[in-house]
Amino acid sequence: MFHYLVTPRLTILFTLLLALVPATAQAKRGPCRPDGTGPTCQVWTGKVTSINDGDTFDVDIDGDHKKRSYHIRFIGIQAMELTVHSENPRKRRGQCHGLEATNFVVNQVRKAHKRVRLTTQHPTTDHLGRWFRTPQLRIGGKWVDLGELEMQRGLTLWMHHEPSIDKLYNELEQQAALRGIGMFDTTHCGVGPDQDVPLKVWVMSDPFGDERLDGFNTEWVKIQNLNPTKSISLARWWMRDSELRRYTFPAGTVIPAGRTITLHVGRGNRSATDFYWGLHESVWENSIDGAGVGDGGYLFDPKGDLRAWMIYPCLVQCSDPNQGAVRVTASPGGNEFVRVTNVSSHVVDLYGYELRFPGGYAFPEGTVLDPGQSVRVDIEGSPSNDSSRVLHLGHSGPYMPDSGGSVELTNFSETRLGCDSWGSGHC
């Protein structure tokens, strides 16, 4: 994603600098987290009057002296959508996992006798006028974060929005994914097509250079069929990030055994291996070192099951079989290049890895190093001149600053395999 602002995309697209809070219901100030820790937030209290779905409810705010409720959109989570909203649970209809998240919220609100505490560091509203807030309920004599409870159970996707909870929610989602619970139970909605075929997903969220110049097509997600003998049809499967955008693969979409297809964010001419979302904006958030800020790529089958995903940056059980297998050497002067050498005793396939400057360069398919072999990535030069041992990033002119910098080799979940720095830079 292009580095144009630090604030979350939802804030950029939809919203107003301050939430429309009545003067008679001014927020108090207090700790963001329900246990009294974290930074200072603005705080409101109130009573839940209705529940819309797994990430939205209405609240009558204390002290505003008005007989009305405000729509509250939970910060940092994304529940699957309902198609029919009703106070009667038997009448609710929606996407798989949507009903589960809604019913969980209903039960928790009931336990709290409908009392709620709402917090945020930066009050905003969306284009529908809903307040973005973190809802906290008093259950069993203590305040608990409702979004945190949902994330612990894998009922919702994490959506970067506010520093006070970003890293926590990201970590909880990754723990749920490792446990295979909630949305990460790949047969929860029913046995889908080719359930035995393993798939791998990886996202290029922050490509080298300015992705706007290529219509956002250097930002992409790849889906690899890991079965060496069986092809898989992706007709009517769909890809999404943590927001509501989705791309549905058309009839005839097939990934041959062991091969990969690429979904580009922008526009282009579709082929058997390259697909185009047709968007005029970045989809995937750039990660921010140390803050847990990032995103995910999520592939759903026609039954509604989440079948493959990638969540970044990795925060839980982060390892890679090629850690320690490669050495990265940067040459910032003259003809700038980066060399990657296989220092292990086994073959290293660099497809599915990237060099990060921090903007990323993805190694092309077929970049395979035998023990002792190297590949050089020249900063300048056209990729059309690539060979098996010399690749080209395609930048025009010098890029690596003489004063100092660093380059690292990572997988797309940002687990580091190797790094080199020079001058004032550090790894």
Image (cartoon, grey):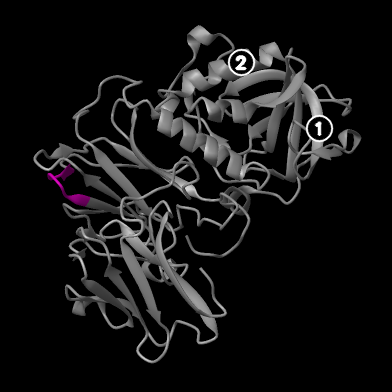
The part of the chain drawn in magenta is: 253-260
The residue depicted at 49 percent of the width and 7 percent of the height is 90
Q: Above or below — where is 414 with respect to 60?
A: below
Amino acid type of the residue tagged 1 in the rendering: Trp
Q: Above or below — where is 315 with respect to 152?
A: below
Disc number for residue 62 = none
Q: Position of residue 333 (x, y in %)?
A: 42, 89
| Residue 384 as seen in the image, left or right of residue 201 | left
Kindly indicate the quadrant of the structure image that contains residue 197.
top left
Q: Earlier in the sequence, mark 2 or mark 1?
A: 1
Kindly indicate the quadrant of the structure image that contains residue 248.
top left
Which of 115/427 is in front? 427
Disc number for residue 44 = 1
Q: Above or below — where is 32 with respect to 218?
A: above
The residue depicted at 25 percent of the width and 59 percent of the height is 351
Q: Position of residue 110 (x, y in %)?
A: 67, 12
Question: Principal SS element in the magenta part?
Answer: loop
Amino acid type of the residue tagged 2 in the rendering: Val
Q: Above or below — where is 357 with respect to 181?
A: below
Q: Position of residue 212 (x, y in %)?
A: 43, 67
Circles 2 and 1: CB atoms closer than 8 Å: no
Which of 196/410 is in front? 410
Identify the secondary structure beneath mark 1.
strand
Asked if residue 257 lies in the magenta stretch, the reply is: yes
* Mark 1: few/some/many CA within 10 Å (<14, 14-19, 20+): many
Kindly tell me whether residue 68 is visible in this rendering.
Answer: no
Kindly tell me whether residue 424 is visible in this rendering.
Answer: yes
* Mark 2: few/some/many CA within 10 Å (<14, 14-19, 20+): many
Q: Which residue is mark 2?
A: 106
Which of 131/105 is in front? 105
